[in-house]
Image (cartoon, helix red, strand yellow):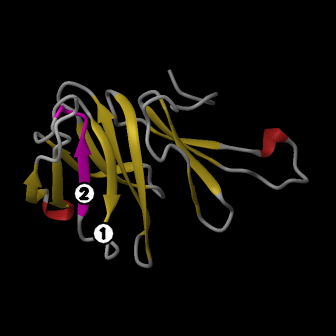
């Protein structure tokens, strides 16, 4: 069984749910547990000239995404999910493969992820009642800071 095409995207409860990458303006967005990289194609070409690539490593609903553009390795994406024990995946847009898997800190889900300007760190905010925050040195798979934010009333 292989995935050929998806329709729609996650908009309910998702943050930063459509990002554009590259000089061609390819769109990256979540559809359930899948992240889609959709090429716009040339305006003069038919819709059939458009293409989609899929990142299928998540096992739960993708709830947030963040993009970091590097000069060396191209574009890197971080995605979080909504699950009892959610994961954050940092992955290569070029290869559509997981580079680093982060898990064990958040419960319920991850509502937001973002890279530091240098790309060395990744911050995440949880969906738990305390909106727990973690800062990772993601390449080392280590949390360098964590805290509670506020209690959701």
Mostly what secondary structure, the magenta segment? strand
Q: Callout 1 environment at 10 Å: few (<14), some (14 to 19), or many (20+)?
A: few
Residue labelled with disc 1: 116
Residue labelled with disc 2: 123
Going 11% across and 46% down the picture, which residue do you hit? 148
Which quarter of the figure is the C terminus placed in?
Answer: top left
- Place of residue 88 in the rendered image (x, y in percent of width and height, measured from the top left): 26, 44
What span is in magenta?
122-129
| Magenta run includes residue 85 | no
> In this view, which residue lies farthest toward the front?
153
- Place of residue 61 in the rendered image (x, y in percent of width and height, measured from the top left): 38, 28
Q: Is residue 6 left or right of residue 47?
A: left
Going 34% across and 34% down the picture, which residue do you hit? 58
| Magenta run includes residue 127 | yes
Going 32% across and 63% down the picture, which residue do you hit? 115
Pointers 1 and 2 in contact (C-beta within 8 Å)? yes
Disc ID at residue 21: none
Q: CA distance from mark 1 to mark 2?
A: 8 Å
Front-most of residues 107 and 60 = 107
Q: Callout 2 environment at 10 Å: few (<14), some (14 to 19), or many (20+)?
A: some
Mark 1 lies on a secondary structure that is loop
Q: Is residue 25 left or right of residue 16?
A: right
Residue 27 vertical position relative to residue 140 in the rendered view, above or below: above
Front-most of residues 1 and 69 = 69
**1 or 2: tag closer to the N-terminus:** 1
Q: Is residue 20 left or right of residue 63?
A: right
- Place of residue 140 in the rendered image (x, y in percent of width and height, measured from the top left): 13, 63
């Amino acid at each position: 069984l292989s995935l050929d095409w998806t329709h729609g995207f996650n908009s309910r409860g998702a943050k930063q749910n459509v990002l554009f990458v590259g000089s061609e303006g390819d769109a990256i967005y979540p559809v359930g547990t899948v992240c889609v990289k959709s090429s716009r194609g040339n305006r003069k070409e038919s819709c059939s000239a458009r293409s989609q690539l899929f990142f299928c490593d998540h096992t739960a609903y993708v709830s947030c995404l963040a993009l970091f553009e590097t000069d060396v390795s191209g574009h890197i994406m971080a995605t979080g999910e909504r699950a009892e024990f959610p994961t954050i995946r940092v992955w290569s847009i070029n290869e559509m493969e997981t580079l680093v898997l982060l898990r064990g800190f958040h419960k319920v889900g991850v509502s937001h992820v973002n890279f530091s300007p240098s790309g060395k760190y990744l911050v995440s905010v949880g969906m738990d009642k305390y909106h727990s925050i973690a800062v990772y040195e993601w390449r080392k798979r280590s949390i360098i800071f964590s805290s509670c934010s506020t209690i959701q009333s």
